[in-house]
Image (spheres, grey):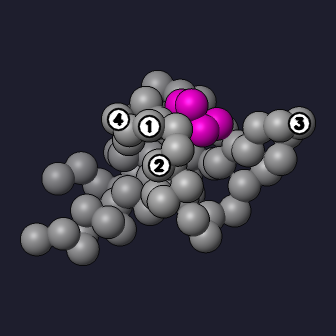
Amino acid sequence: MATKQELINDIRRTYGNMLNVTQLAKLFNCDRRTVPNYVSGLPFFSMGKDKKYLAIDIGRRIYDRMEESP
């Protein structure tokens, strides 16, 4: 399993430091409508109509979920 920092760096390298819902849907391999299930409770920035999430917050959430699963 990758370390938390490796995971965050991979996300930054692929998508940049701030991800919108479309990029998160590609990352999670899901529909845009299911992204809120993954990111609920995370801080975001409103930029016009877009919500942008920081790569570090997304990486931490993914890593924590990976540790929880058997």
Q: Residues within 10 Å of mark 3 (few under 14, many from 20)?
A: few
Tell me whether the residue at label 4 lies in contact with that at label 2, contact meaning CB atoms closer than 8 angstroms.
Answer: no
* Mark closer to the chain start, 4 or 2: 4
Instruction: Name the residue that disc number 1 marks.
Output: 31
- Where residue 2 appears, as percent x and y from the top left, is 24, 50
Tell me whether the residue at label 3 lies in contact with that at label 1, contact meaning CB atoms closer than 8 angstroms.
Answer: no
In this picture, is 70 found above or below 35? below
Residue 33 can be seen in this image: yes
Q: Amino acid at mark 2?
A: Thr
Q: CA distance from mark 4 to mark 3?
A: 25 Å
Numbered label attached to residue 48: 3
Residue 17 can be seen in this image: no
- Farthest residue, direction left: 70
Q: CA distance from mark 2 to mark 1?
A: 6 Å
- Farthest residue, direction top: 14
| Total numbered badges shown on the rendered structure | 4
Q: CA distance from mark 3 to mark 1?
A: 21 Å
Q: CA distance from mark 4 to mark 2?
A: 10 Å
* Mark closer to the chain start, 4 or 3: 4
Which is more toward the observer, 18 or 33? Answer: 33
Region of the chain picked out in magenta, as a range: 19-23
* Mark 4 secondary-structure assignment: loop
